[in-house]
Amino acid sequence: MVIPAYNEERRIGHSLELIKEYMQRSGYNYEIVVVDDGSRDATSQIVSNISQDNPRIRLIINETNRGKGYTVRRGVLEAAGDAILFSDADLSTPIEEFEKLLGYLDDFDIVIASRSLPDSQVLVHQPLYRELMGRTFNALVQAMLVRGIIDTQCGFKLMRGNAARCIFQKARINSFSFDVEMILIAKRMGYRVKDVPVRWIDSRGSRVHPIKDSAHMLLDLFRIKLYDFLGYYGR
């Protein structure tokens, strides 16, 4: 499991405890790779303290803030599992939803949690302006790059280990748009992708700046389209 973390001192300890309890209760053989993206708070120290009592938890530190895409990519390429779950540190998608995604991994290579399918359960919504931003971004993604996946940005995705490593070796995007690039690469490489409805609870404290990061994400969609046109993602 890979968890990107940036200034998460208020919730990373609780999230790790919930994940650890769930994995042990379910009997899974697991590792948790936390990648600290240059946090300026006590995130690294908290994870380091927890990892001393649990060798299944590993901490990797980016010396400077490199972006969520870079951070997830580094964690995936460091992970050793046959299946790799990427999850946001806030567990907006509860860890118990892992079971739902795992059920599809026999038939698919990438299983994506979705907040937008008919059977999805959004128990606590984002503020309206963020929901509108998300819908606008997804409309652009559908028009420019990836059709058929109506929620590319949910921070909970399960991948076959070998597929994940192949995909992220080709990935280039360091920003929040990395999910779109990952799905596009998967499709270009012939991997099977499935989106699955999940329970989702908005956790306040989003790291996405509504203006600066939205502009960066839009620019990265054009970068992804260019990289695809140049054949960087394979055919």
Image: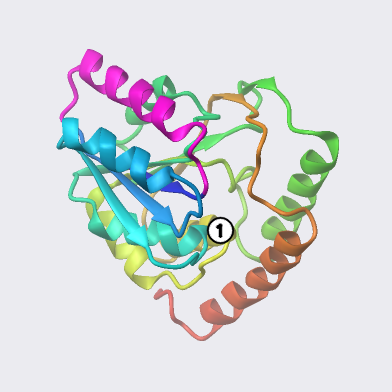
Q: Is residue 79 above or below residue 217?
A: above
Q: Is residue 17 above or below residue 106?
A: above
Secondary structure predominantly adopted by residues drawn in magenta: helix
Count of residue discs: 1
Q: Is residue 114 above or below residue 150?
A: above
- Secondary structure beneath label 1: helix
Residue range corresponding to the magenta coloring: 7-29
- Across and down, in percent, residue 206 comes to 65, 42
- Report the front residue among 70 and 49: 49
Residue ID for mark 1: 180
- Across and down, in percent, residue 127 comes to 80, 34
**Looking at the figure, which quarter contains the C terminus?**
bottom left
Farthest top residue? 25
Q: Is residue 44 magenta?
A: no
Q: Is residue 25 above or below residue 49?
A: above
Asked if one can make out residue 1 in the rendered structure from this viewpoint, the answer is: no
The residue at the point 49 percent across, 56 percent down is 183
Instruction: Please state if 80 lies on the left or on the right of 197 as rendered.
Output: left
